[in-house]
Amino acid sequence: MAQEQKRTYPVSLESWGYSQTGNMRNTNQDSFLNWAERKLWAVGDGVGGQETSGAASKTIMTMLMQTPEPEMFSTHIANVTRILEEANSLLVSQKLATDKMAASTIVALLVHGDMAACLWAGDSRCYILRGGILYQCTKDHSLRQEKIDRGDLTVFEAQRMVKGNIITNAVGVKSKLTLGEEVFSIRAGDRFLLCTDGLTNLLSADALMTYLSRQSAKEAVDGIAESLAPMRQPDNITFVIMFVSRFD
């Protein structure tokens, strides 16, 4: 196997994060990380009781802030994976000690040079807008998606499931954490969106494309936030937007 080369590419990035308590909720169990300097972004949605789930998502983000600066792309992936596994062990231990669920979904985007990786557990998502097309980089760990993957239901049929949004994976649920992973190259002009299901349950793919097509990540965040204001919000809403402006 060829040894990975240490490659660096100066790249211009802009990123902003946003979180709000849904107008039908008393507390916000979501958390996010917007760490452009370390080229690491993440969003989490707490699972379980209101107090423990909010603490779980915050714990994960706090631990991710310990991610060291990597020398290579593979090291960056390994560091983030290790920290998420450590967070999983901590949350599982807390659950065993207190008999209270303390878990959270996670979706993390990390960049090194001209490469990116997306790691996730649960139904928080990562999208990329490239060349006028919106791609979903993640695949939900949910009962609905399992039914689709097994061929039990079509996509249309699965959308009608009453309990299809039940998640089948999260950080802090099982003793061994299994992460989804996608690796891909990035290009100037790429626009990324990481979000909880509180956003995707309200805005269509076409609406997300419209806001991600704005001139800056800040304008995209502001546009989404403004569009949500008059809506009925049964869930908390959290998202991070990152634009790759150019390679120098």
Image (cartoon, rainbow, N blue to C red):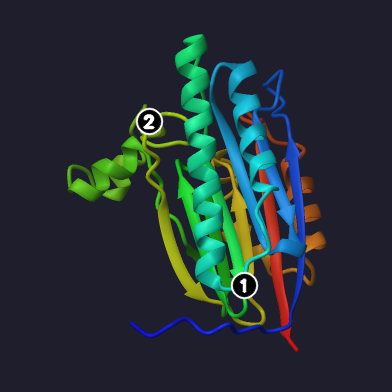
Residue type at tag 2: Lys
- Residue at image position (51%, 65%) is 117
Q: Which residue is mark 1?
A: 71
Asked if 209 appears above or below 8 in the picture, the reply is: above
- Residue at image position (18%, 48%) is 151
Asked if 112 appears above or below 59 in the picture, the reply is: below
Residue nearest the viewer, comparing 229 with 152 = 152
Q: Which residue is mark 2?
A: 174
**What SS does tag 2 mark?**
loop
Asked if 13 appears above or below 15 in the picture, the reply is: below
Asked if 116 appears above or below 200 in the picture, the reply is: below
Residue type at tag 1: Glu
- Circles 1 and 2: CB distance less than 8 Å? no
Where is residue 18 shown, x and y percent of the image? 75, 46
Which quarter of the rendering shows the N terminus? bottom left
Tell me if 16 is positioned left or right of 233 in this view: right
